Image (tube, rainbow, N blue to C red):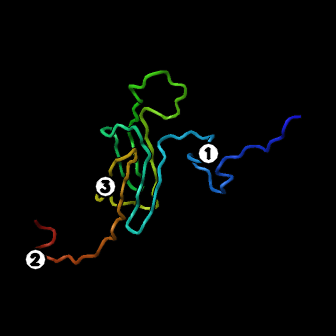
Amino acid sequence: MTESRPPRRPIAFVLGVKPGPALDPTSSIAGPAVDVVEHDGGYILVVEVPGADTARLQVEVKGRSVTVRGERLPTDGEAGRFLRVERAVGPFERTIELPEEPDSERAEASYGDGLLRIELARRTASRSREIKIGRGVAGHS
């Protein structure tokens, strides 16, 4: 007699969360996994890029979008024959949309232990300022 098993469900279904690339085993991840944290001062993005060539990592902030580009290098110097390869290698790109446009002038990034950490400050509200009116004739230079 064969054992009857219930159908397998994605972990996102079991946990009761909306599936995303990291939780849905049927989707392909276009780039590295990213955690985005919002706090009072802005945003922190933590991007998993183990084995990335740090000289080729790029971070671009354009409007509300943050794009990370880079390349993961293959492991070299391994003696023997690979029986399984699951770590992605090669160029990658990942774009994250934030709820609001950050202040790109105050952005900072650091890399360590295979993680790229991007800190983005919120834009400061534009302040009003009084403009003094000089003497002269309008329309003449």
Q: Are marks 1 and 2 in contact (CB under 8 Å)?
A: no
* Label 2 Cα neighbours within 10 Å, binned few <14 / some 14-19 / many ≥20: few
Amino acid type at mark 3: Glu
In the picture shown, does residue 55 fall above or below 123?
Answer: above
In three-dimensional space, the C-alpha distance between marks 3 and 1, rounded to whole angstroms, equals 31 Å
In the picture shown, does residue 129 fall above or below 26?
Answer: below
Q: Name the residue under label 3.
A: 108
In the rendering, at what x and y percent does residue 7 appear?
77, 43
* Label 3 Cα neighbours within 10 Å, binned few <14 / some 14-19 / many ≥20: few
Give the residue displayed 49% in from the left and 46% down from the top: 33
Amino acid type at mark 1: Asp
Give the residue displayed 43% in from the left and 41% down from the top: 93
Viewer-nearest of discs 1 and 2: 1
Label 3: which secondary element: strand
Question: Which quarter of the figure is the N terminus placed in?
Answer: top right
Q: Mark 1 points at which residue?
A: 24
In three-dimensional space, the C-alpha distance between marks 1 and 2, rounded to whole angstroms, equals 68 Å
Label 2: which secondary element: loop
Query: Which of the two labelled residues, at mark 2 and mark 3, occupies the earlier sequence position?
Result: 3
In the rendering, at what x and y percent does residue 30 appear?
50, 40
Query: Which of the two labelled residues, at mark 1 and mark 2, occupies the earlier sequence position?
Result: 1
Give the residue displayed 40% in from the left and 44% down from the top: 114
In the rendering, at what x and y percent does residue 105 appear?
28, 58
In the rendering, at what x and y percent does residue 83 appear?
54, 25
List the single residue furthest toward the front: 79
Label 1: which secondary element: loop
Amino acid type at mark 2: Arg
What's the mark number on residue 67? none
Q: Nearer the viewer, residue 48 or 2?
A: 2
* Label 1 Cα neighbours within 10 Å, binned few <14 / some 14-19 / many ≥20: some
Q: Name the residue under label 2.
A: 135
